Image (tube, grey):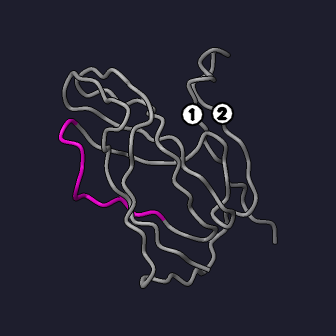
C-alpha cells in the first residue's frame, strides 16, 4: 500500500526576492509514529530575540532567536507564562526543514505584536518546554 504524500510549506523572507511567498516540498519520514516522552527531564528554555525588528500593530514577522538545541524525537510545547507583553510568540524553528527524528536547532521564530514597537536584541519573546523522547 502506498502512503499519501506529505508536504512541508517553507516560508522565508529570502523567497520574496525570487517572487515567491512559500515553497511546498514533498517529504518522507513524517508518518504517524509512537514516541515515548520523558517528562522527568523537561527543559524550560527562554526564547530570546537575536536581532532588532520593527512591528506595526497586529503584524507578524520572523525574528531571529538565540539558537535552541532540540534533540531528535523531542517535542516543543509553548509555555504561556513569562511572555512578552508586546505580543505573542507563534512558533520556533529553522528555515531549513528537519524531520522530528533528527537533531534540530531552532534559530528563528514568528512573533506577532499587538502594538507598534520594536523587538530588541536580548528581549524575551516567550518560553518553551522541550520534552525529550525516543
Q: Main secondary structure of the magenta part?
A: loop
On the picture, is 29 further left or further right than 14?
Answer: right
Residue 11 is marked as 1
Q: Quadrant of the C terminus?
A: bottom right
Q: Name the residue rendered at 48%, 35% in the picture.
A: 64
Q: Name the residue rendered at 62%, 72% in the picture.
A: 32
Q: Are marks 1 and 2 in contact (CB under 8 Å)?
A: yes
Looking at the rendered structure, the secondary structure element under dot 1 is: loop
Mark 2 lies on residue? 23
Q: Is residue 80 magenta?
A: yes
Q: Position of residue 125 (x, y in %)?
A: 32, 44
Q: Tag count in the figure?
A: 2
Question: Start and end of the magenta stretch?
Answer: 76-86
Q: Name the residue rendered at 39%, 38% in the picture.
A: 49
* Image-quadrant location for residue 63: top left
Pick out the residue farthest to the front. Answer: 122
Indicate which disc, 1 or 2, sits on the residue closer to the N terminus: 1
Q: Position of residue 51 (x, y in %)?
A: 43, 29
Amino acid at each position: 500500500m502506498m502512503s499519501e504524500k506529505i508536504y512541508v510549506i517553507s516560508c522565508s523572507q529570502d523567497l520574496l526576492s525570487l517572487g515567491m511567498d512559500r515553497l511546498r516540498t514533498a517529504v518522507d519520514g513524517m508518518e504517524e509514529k509512537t514516541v515515548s516522552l520523558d517528562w522527568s527531564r523537561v527543559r524550560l528554555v527562554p526564547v530570546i530575540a537575536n536581532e532588532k525588528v520593527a512591528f506595526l500593530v497586529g503584524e507578524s514577522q520572523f525574528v531571529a532567536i538565540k539558537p535552541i538545541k532540540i534533540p531528535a524525537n523531542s517535542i516543543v510545547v509553548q509555555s504561556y507564562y513569562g511572555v512578552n507583553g508586546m505580543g505573542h510568540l507563534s512558533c520556533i524553528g529553522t528555515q531549513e526543514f528537519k524531520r522530528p527524528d533528527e537533531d534540530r536547532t531552532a534559530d528563528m521564530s514568528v512573533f506577532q505584536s499587538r502594538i507598534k514597537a520594536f523587538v530588541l536584541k536580548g528581549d524575551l519573546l516567550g518560553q518553551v518546554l522541550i520534552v525529550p523522547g525516543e
